Structures are given as structure tokens and as C-alpha cells.
Image (spheres, rainbow, N blue to C red):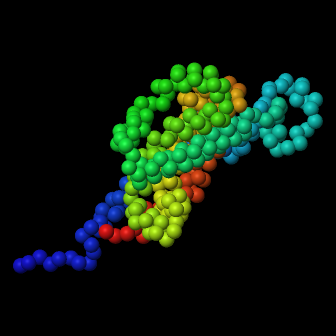
Amino acid sequence: MPSVLDTSRSPLEPSSRSKKIAAVLIIVYVLITIIPLLLIVATAFKSVPDAVTYPPKLFFKPSLEGFINLFTQRTRQPKEYLESLPPPATWYEKIVRKRQMVIAGPSRFFHRFVNSIAIGFGSTFFSVFLGTLAAYGFSRFKIPAKDDLLFFILSTRMFPPIAAAVPIFLMYRTLGLNDTYLGMIVLYTVVNLSLSVWLLKGFIDEIPKEYEEAAMVDGYSRLHAFFKIILPEAATGIAATAIFCLIFAWNEYAFAILLTFREAQTLPPFIPTIIGEGGLDWPAISAATMIFLLPVVVFTILLRKHLLRGITFGAVRK
């Protein structure tokens, strides 16, 4: 007896069982991934004694002591001196006084945070901007030895950038680029450029040339067609590339600690230096880490609609 073909669903559509298994695996993966982040957030709102207790406390009284320690510099004073002072005028001064300390001034965290934003987003902009232009040129024009040039660009990612730390340090010291915004932006741009070119070339290759040809027939110049046609269609690739470039520049530690020490130092080398009384101040470190994560998270959320948009949306069918 011939078998009856089930036409109720497409043969390419996964079965109900497969969907359930995939959902369970995704949920398990998300839980495993998010647990460290939840621990960081929880520790940021613990007091110093609660943060170092063993076994760790799952239920505790929330405290902003970590954020106070992060944004201020404090000095321990004798009890007689503290009693001679007027009563604390603010809620955070009360918390500091309970630890037998007084606030000596603001910390360097905000300055380092501004440095990270300027250097991270500045290098990301130039990496994506230059990478888009180079990728368009490789995709649309006949360039002599194009494959060799692309391989050379890719080869710059075949060894860790820190392997060139010594010559870069000597060159920057000679040029006076140590501990400067310009030096760090240029360095991170150069490191990210190969990734930017290769990612964006793949996206631009998928955009039909007929789009540009039709626009130029209507009177557009090539440059005008590039901005009006290519850039909107390549928005998905540009968004994805920008996120990858920002993540590298935002988290980079080795060059930041080698080439900066005061004016242009970013947060990655600064966060481990947060020292508390008798050891590491884990609530302050966790608070700094939580704040450090926010710009990348916000940047990714703002670009999510471009990441979800298909690159072949409205493409010409051949």
C-alpha cells in the first residue's frame, strides 16, 4: 500500500520534538551564560563584609557601599578625629563614617570611563568607516593582485597583536603617542581594520550590482549611489562589524596597560587596581564591572534592528 505524504507541514520545517529540544538547550545555555553576570550584579549591591563571607550569601541586605567606594577616595581616621567632625551631611557620608573613614575626594573612575568611551567608540568609528571604503573598493573594482592584498590584510590577524608590543612601544615613545587618545585610537583602528574589511566585503558582495547601475542610469554619481544604495543595504554588516570592533577596543587590556598610565588609561587596567581595606574591594570591583558592561549592552540594543534585518531584503532575483 503506498505511503501517504504528509503535506500538513514543510519537510524543511523542524518537528515539534526538535523545537522542544532546541528550546531546552537554548534555555540551559542562557542560564549558564547569565549566572556570572547575576553574581557580579549581586556582589555590586553587597556590603564589604557580605561580599567576602564564606559560603557566599544568596540573601543579603542591599547596600550602595560598593558604588560609594568606586566613585570616592577614602582615608581611615582615628575615632577621636571622627568625633570632632560635624555630623555627616549626606547618606553616603554616613556609610563611609560607619567604616571609620572620611571621603578625601573623587576617584579616578569617571575619568577612566570617559577615556574608554572616547577611545572605544572613536576607534570603532574609524575602523568601520575605513573598512567600509576598503571593502567596497575590493568588491566593486578590479584591483591588481586583489587576492594577495586581501590575504595580506587577513594575515595581520594571524598573530596576537601583543606580539608586536615591544616595537609599538618604542615607536610610540619616539613619536610621543604614549598615553594619548590619538595613539590608542590609531592602534585599535589598525588592529580592527582587517576584521572590518573582511566582514564588510562579504556583505557588500551580496548586494547586487544592478542596484548601483540602475541608480547611475538615473543620474547618480558612484559616490552618491554608494551612500544612497550600498550603505543602507549593508546596514546589517556595518552594525555587526561595529559591535565586534567595539568589543575588542572596549575590553583590550595588554596595550592599555603598556601604553597608557595616566591621561588616556581606560577601565580594563584600572578596575583591578581598586584596593580596599585589607584586600580587594569586591563590591566596588563588581560595581565598576557592571557599569563597564553597560555601554556595550546599550550599543548592541540600539543596533539590534539592523542585526535582525536580512541583507537580501528586496534583492534582485536572478
Q: Report the label total.
A: 0
Residue 57 drawn at (x, y percent) = 59, 41
Q: Residue at x 93, y 36 (%)?
A: 86
Res 217 seen here: yes
Left or right of residue 101, residue 254 in this image? left
Who is closer to the viewer here, 208 or 161?
A: 208
Establish if 5 lies above or below 34: below
Within the image, what quadrant is residue 283 found in? top right
Does 273 sit left or right of 87 as displayed? Answer: left
Residue at screen point 48% across, 66% down: 216
Residue 162 horizontal/vertical position (percent): 49, 28
The residue nearer to you, when weighing 85 against 217, is 217
**Camera-side residue of 21 and 141:** 141
Q: In the figure, is residue 98 to the left or right of 61?
A: right
Q: Where the N terminus falls, by quadrant?
A: bottom left
* Residue ID at (42%, 46%): 198
* On screen, residue 115 above or below 259: below
Q: Quadrant of residue 179?
A: top right
Q: Which quarter of the figure has residue 113?
A: top right
Residue depicted at x 47% and y 47%: 134
Image-based side of 275 in relation to 72, left or right: left
